[in-house]
Each structure stands twice: as structure tokens, then as C-alpha cells.
């Protein structure tokens, strides 16, 4: 699993660069590099479905974030309660890491998963649904409610974006019909 | 164990970005990094040593497949993360148009 | 004398976009249809198809893309996909329960192997195509309005 260590190291470096870079455009491109590293890590971990989806979603995310940040740079402001903010942040991170170290005892060891439900899906999935891709069999047959909810969330976000971007102070009904979306 | 820990380190970097930075785009960046770390942890838990991808092939029997359930859950998570990111970016653009800045402390001062 | 600025990017980008767009659309459709046999599926294929129209919008400018696929069309596409998804789910009551696989299984490892799953994939792909393209068109519309005001 040596390639995973290299990928994780690159992802952590990219994440630090994304948070600490002063230029907004560089920051957005760094976070996209983290996403591409994640896609490669999925491929190494034998999840081709996830790798493909993550790669495509990352490109879309990059385009939308660049659209948002282009020509809108502003200098860093680190004035104000610098010490208090940093102390509170480090306190929260330490609390989080303490909880994590408790939770790490309960997690199964890497490479030996608990497959109580997964075994049943692997054994019966092909006979019951006929789909060769077992991830698709789970998503569209066994757990189709998940899929319905996910698609509904995407549609609702579309409606929400239209509602957020709507112009206020509309005069007449005819004009409102014209720029409905 | 080192792999799990580096996953949590990635989450902590995102958490630091969310809590410490004042720029809205930086906060969105932190949220995206947290989301990546959570997805990665799910797939890491489902991995089996020397496993194969959960796709059947014609004519051959594939033994020792990885757990397909975390992969299905993560596919849902990626979609919802994309929807959340889009709504956040839209809100940031709208705030920039109203106040002319991405700095949350200045937005607090302006009020209304 | 100042030259009038054409909308969109340079000639090279426009030509490549025109050549690549149809192939990309075909690839997206392939990914949607073969979600049950190989990796991919409704969401990934839908995003690929939305990226085709986003590419056209980036290369040719707002007007050129909206002639191909209007914003009302995007909303209609997403709505049709969602209605199709719920209709397939309700047809499952014919065989017992919500989301039941009411079609036969067919031949394994072929396209017609998983009953209702390809149709669910098509519906999901339509919703994703309409939603993401509509979001990007709305953002671009807002962006250009903001530039006009300055």
C-alpha cells in the first residue's frame, strides 16, 4: 500500500496549500488537486465507480468555483482577536482528535472489514437483480430510496439556486414571467 | 492505522480552515476538504486486503471482493456534497454582490 | 479603430469544442445506458452530458449555448426526469412494492440484463443533466448582469 501513503501525503500538502494560499484562484485550484488525488486513491482502493464520479464532479466544482472567484480577489485580513481565535480553534481540534483516538479502538483493522450486510449483497446480488455491477445493484435496487432522495436533493438545490439568484424589487408580472430562470 | 490517522489529519485541516479563516471562499474550501476526508474514511473501512472491485466478469469467478455497501453510500454522499457546494457558492456570490467583499467580519459590520 | 469583441473564446477553442461536443455527448449516453454492466451509471453520465453544454457555453458565449438548450428546457428536462423516476417507482406496486423490479431479468452480461435499472438510470441522467446545466446557466446569467451594471 505504498502508493496510498504517497497519495495521502500529496493530498495533505494540497489541503494545507488550499487553506493557507493568499490568492483565491490558487486556493481553488489546490483544492481541486486534492480532489484529483482522492479520485486516484479511490482507484487504488478498488472503487472504480467512485473514482469516475469524483473525477467528473471535481471538474464541475472547479469550473463553478473559478466562475465565483474570478476577478474578485481581496487582501488577507488577519487583524482583530488573533490569539483568541487560534486558541479556540486549536482547542476544538484537540477535542476532536481525542474523540477520534477513542473511536479508532472500535474501528476494524485496515484490510479486514466487517462485512455483515456486504456478504449478503455479494452472494445474492447477481441472482436477485441481474446487474453485473454490484454497486449499481445496491443503489438502484436494494437501496433505491437513497437514489430517489439524492436526486430530489439535486433538484431542490437547482430550485434553491434559482430562488437565491432572483432579482428583488420586481415591478410587473410580465417582467417577472420574462426572467423566471 | 496510519492511513486512518492521515485521513483524520485531512479532516482537521479542513476544520481549521472553517474555523479560522475569514474569507467565505476559504470557508467553502474547508468544508469541501472535510467532505473529502469523510468519503475517504468510508472507502478505507470497506477495503479488503488484496480485494477486487465489486464488478462481475463474464466466464470467470472473482473471489475476495471489497465491500460494496460503503461505495454505494459514498456515491450518494458525493452527489449531496456537490449540491451543497453549489448552494454555498451561490450564497457567496450573492453576498459579494450585496456587500462588495468576501470578508465575513466586514459583512458583520455593514449590517443591512 | 476598436474591433468589436465577439462573444466566447478564440477560434481554436470554438473549433475543438464543435468537434468534441458530439463525441462527449455520445460517451455520456453510453455511460448512462451501461450503468448496470460496468462502472458509471446515471449520475456520472448525466454530469458528462451537462459538461458538454457547459463546454459549449464557455466556448461560444451565453447566447450561443442558450440557442442550443434554453433555460426553460433545462427546467423541463429535470422535471421530466423526476416524474419518470417516480412513475417507475410507483409502477413497482404492480409486482408488490415501491421500486420493485417489475421487468424480467433477460440475459446476463448483456444490456438487457437487469430489468428496470437502465430506465432508472436514464431518468436520473435526465434530472442531473437538467439541474446542473440550469444551475450553470443561472450563474452565468447573474455574472453577465453584474458585469453590465459596473
Image (cartoon, coloured by chain):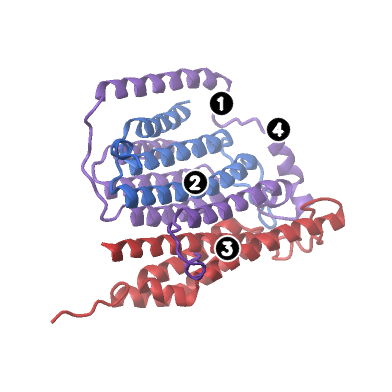
Helix, strand or loop status at disc 4 = helix
Quadrant of the rendered image containing residue C5: bottom left
> Quick one: SS at disc 2?
helix
Q: Looking at this view, is A147 or A125 the one in front?
A: A147
The label nearer to you, 2 versus 4, is 2
- For image coordinates 33% across by 52% down, the residue present is B97
Is label 2 on the same chain as label 4? Answer: no
Residue identifier under label 1: A109
Please name the residue shown 64% across and 43% down the image: B68
Q: CA distance from mark 3 to mark 1?
A: 35 Å
Residue A12 screen position, x and y as percent = 36, 36
The quadrant where residue C6 appears: bottom left
**Which chain did the image draw in purple?**
A
- In the image, C118: left or right of A56? right
The chain under label 2 reads: B
List the residue tagged with mark 2.
Answer: B84
Q: Kindly identify which residue carries mark 4.
A: A116
Discs 4/1, front: 4
Q: Is residue C80 above or below residue A91?
A: below
**Host chain of mark 1:** A
Distance between mark 3 and mark 2 Cα atoms: 25 Å
Tell me whether circle 4 and circle 3 mark residues in contact (CB < 8 Å). no
Secondary-structure class at tag 1: loop
Residue furthest out toward the bottom: C1
Is label 3 in a helix, a strand or a loop? helix
Amino acid at each position: 500500500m505504498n502508493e496510498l501513503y504517497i497519495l495521502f501525503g500529496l493530498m495533505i500538502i494540497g489541503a494545507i496549500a488550499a487553506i493557507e494560499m493568499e490568492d483565491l484562484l490558487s486556493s481553488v485550484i489546490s483544492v481541486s488537486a486534492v480532489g484529483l488525488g482522492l479520485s486516484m486513491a479511490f482507484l487504488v482502493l478498488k472503487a472504480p465507480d467512485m473514482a469516475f464520479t469524483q473525477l467528473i464532479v471535481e471538474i464541475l466544482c472547479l469550473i463553478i468555483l473559478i466562475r465565483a472567484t474570478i476577478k474578485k480577489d481581496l487582501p488577507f485580513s488577519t487583524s482583530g482577536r488573533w490569539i483568541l481565535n487560534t486558541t479556540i480553534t486549536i482547542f476544538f481540534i484537540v477535542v476532536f482528535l481525542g474523540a477520534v483516538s477513542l473511536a479508532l479502538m472500535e474501528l476494524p483493522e485496515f484490510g479486514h472489514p466487517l462485512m455483515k450486510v456486504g456478504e449478503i449483497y455479494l452472494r445474492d446480488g447477481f441472482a436477485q437483480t441481474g446487474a453485473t455491477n454490484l454497486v449499481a445493484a445496491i443503489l438502484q435496487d436494494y437501496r433505491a430510496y437513497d437514489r430517489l432522495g439524492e436526486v430530489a436533493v439535486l433538484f431542490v438545490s437547482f430550485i434553491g439556486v434559482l430562488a437565491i439568484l432572483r432579482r428583488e424589487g420586481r415591478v410587473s408580472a410580465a417582467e417577472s414571467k420574462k426572467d423566471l430562470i | 492505522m496510519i492511513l486512518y490517522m492521515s485521513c483524520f489529519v485531512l479532516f482537521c485541516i479542513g476544520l481549521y480552515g472553517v474555523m479560522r479563516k475569514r474569507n467565505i471562499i476559504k470557508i467553502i474550501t474547508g468544508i469541501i476538504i472535510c467532505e473529502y476526508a469523510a468519503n475517504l474514511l468510508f472507502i478505507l473501512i470497506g477495503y479488503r486486503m488484496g480485494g477486487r472491485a465489486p464488478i462481475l466478469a463474464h466466464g470467470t469467478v472473482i473471489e475476495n471482493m471489497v465491500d460494496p455497501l460503503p461505495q454505494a453510500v459514498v456515491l450518494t454522499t458525493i452527489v449531496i456534497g456537490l449540491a451543497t457546494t453549489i448552494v454555498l457558492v451561490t450564497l457567496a456570490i450573492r453576498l459579494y454582490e450585496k456587500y462588495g467583499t468576501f470578508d465575513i467580519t466586514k459583512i458583520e459590520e455593514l449590517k443591512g | 479603430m476598436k474591433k468589436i469583441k465577439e462573444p466566447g473564446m478564440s477560434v481554436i477553442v470554438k473549433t475543438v469544442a464543435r468537434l468534441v461536443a458530439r463525441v462527449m455527448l455520445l460517451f455520456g449516453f453510453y455511460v448512462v445506458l451501461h450503468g448496470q454492466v460496468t462502472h458509471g451509471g446515471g449520475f456520472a453520465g448525466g454530469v458528462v452530458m451537462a459538461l458538454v453544454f457547459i463546454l459549449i457555453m464557455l466556448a461560444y458565449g451565453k447566447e450561443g449555448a442558450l440557442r442550443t438548450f434554453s433555460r426553460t428546457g433545462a427546467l423541463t428536462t429535470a422535471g421530466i426526469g423526476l416524474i419518470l423516476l417516480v412513475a417507475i417507482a410507483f409502477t413497482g406496486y404492480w409486482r408488490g412494492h415501491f421500486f420493485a423490479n417489475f421487468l424480467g431479468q433477460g440475459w446476463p452480461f448483456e444490456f438487457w440484463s437487469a430489468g428496470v435499472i437502465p430506465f432508472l438510470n436514464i431518468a436520473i441522467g435526465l434530472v442531473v443533466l437538467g439541474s446542473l446545466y440550469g444551475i450553470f446557466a443561472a450563474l452565468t446569467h447573474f455574472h453577465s448582469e453584474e458585469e453590465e451594471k459596473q
